[in-house]
Image (cartoon, rainbow, N blue to C red):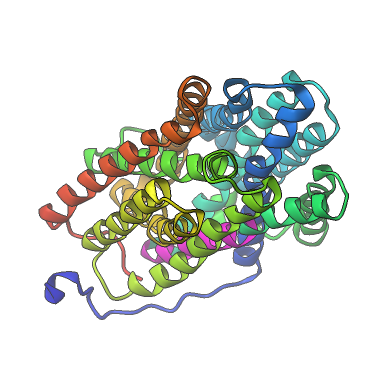
Amino acid sequence: MAALLLLPTEQHAFIRDKATWVGYLLVGTYCLVLASMGPVVPYLRDEQGLNYTVSSFHFSAWALGGITAGTFGNLVIGKIGCARAVWTCCSGVVLATIILISAKLPVFTILSGYIGGTCGSMMGHSITSIMAKRFGQQRTIGITEANIAGSLFALSAPLLVGQCVRMGQSWRVALAVPLILFICIFLSSRKVFNNFNAATSGFATGTLPLSYWFYWFVIWFSVASEWSIIYWTSEFLEKAKGLAREDAIQAISIFLVTMLIGRILGLKLARTFRVAPLLLVVSVVALSGFLMYWLAPTHVLSLVGLAITGLGTANIYPLSYSQALGAAEEKAGLAAARMSLSTGTAVLITPLLMGAIGDRCGIYNAFAVVATLMTLATILLAIASQRKAKPHVVA
């Protein structure tokens, strides 16, 4: 078994320059905004008198923006180049955050999600495309570290929102933090991507191979599960497990912290073990942890299960994403754009479905959707492991 898991021993240096770190910071700051929606929506629901279904429109708007970026983003980026797209879309995320903070009606707070999802996804595509061009097969390190940065920033979102509320401030104060960060990054680094060919060239066109679409579906199930947990955990722990709202909001950080730890560990494991069986192992861990989180009779055991779920879930997306980009070969930019159709539709559909079930049957029963999705992802990864597919990655 160990012989099947071990990667070849060839190693390559990975250089982190200013452009790499700026990419990580931009991804992280966007994730801070995105992850804030989970703890913010309960307050929006109270302020605007919304039910679960309408509340879920805020999550789905971000997803619809991701779908838009996945469908048309490659055309826009091909016209203006990756470097200009990074900063143009960064400005769009800033605008979306300002609208969310200042708007009082749901039509505008939902619209802010669509703008933020579109611009944030296109910014991510541009950064990923630059990394793929620069690092080649070593893109796994860059992609995984970018996801680690995203996890690090995202885990601070519920802590930041919860602490602001505990101190008697509005949740809106918390969202001023990413606004300041975006402005500082732009002022200090606006020319950092201009030296790379990928910054001025468009995406390769054509069709993507079947092996790419296999991982497209794995990512669909995984992202749907991950973001459903992030979006609805505060409601679940408050309504089904009896925690106070502020405690339930901050408990989301348990999932995000263990995702961060899991991605750090995953980066080390990916240097040693083959990706296909490693993906199966982490998927089984995630599913086991989720069943404990969902079905446990006490909130303490649920929180333990939530932590285990984060450890397992952490690496399904970045490892599958790297495999998908490897399958796409020279069409990595197109593959990154099309992957937003996977992540976008996953986050568009699942919160709506869970919100509708929550209104009819309660939030506890709505989490059966997540159990189903995680089971399907595990089945697909078991098939991939049995096929012993050759990894596309050398870390």
Identify the residue at image location x=31%, y=68%: 394
User: What residue occupies the far right of the structure in this picture?
Assistant: 168
Q: Quadrant of the N terminus?
A: bottom left
Indicate yes or no whether the magenta region holds residue 277.
no
**Image location (x, y in percent) of residue 308:** 41, 61
- Of residues 17 and 93, the one nearer the viewer is 93
Q: Quadrant of residue 278?
A: bottom left
Which stretch appears magenta? 137-154
> On screen, 330 above or below 188?
above
Percent x, y of residue 327: 28, 49
**From this viewpoint, is residue 44 visible?**
yes
Residue 226, percent from left and from top: 46, 46
Q: Position of residue 275 (x, y in %)?
A: 27, 62
Which quarter of the figure is the C terminus placed in?
bottom left
As displayed, is residue 256 above or below residue 240?
below
Establish if 76 lies above or below 181.
above
Q: State the residue in front, 29 or 371.
A: 371
Quadrant in which residue 105 is drawn: top right
Residue for point 35% across, 55% down: 286
Give the mark count. Answer: 0
Q: Main secondary structure of the magenta part?
A: helix
Name the quadrant containing residue 151.
Answer: bottom right
Residue at 60% x, 43% y is: 238
Q: Is residue 278 left or right of residue 316?
A: left
Q: Is residue 150 magenta?
A: yes
Residue 134, visible in the rendered structure: no
The residue positioned 66% from the left and 60% from the top of the image is 25
Query: In the drawing, does residue 228 fall left or right of residue 122?
Result: left
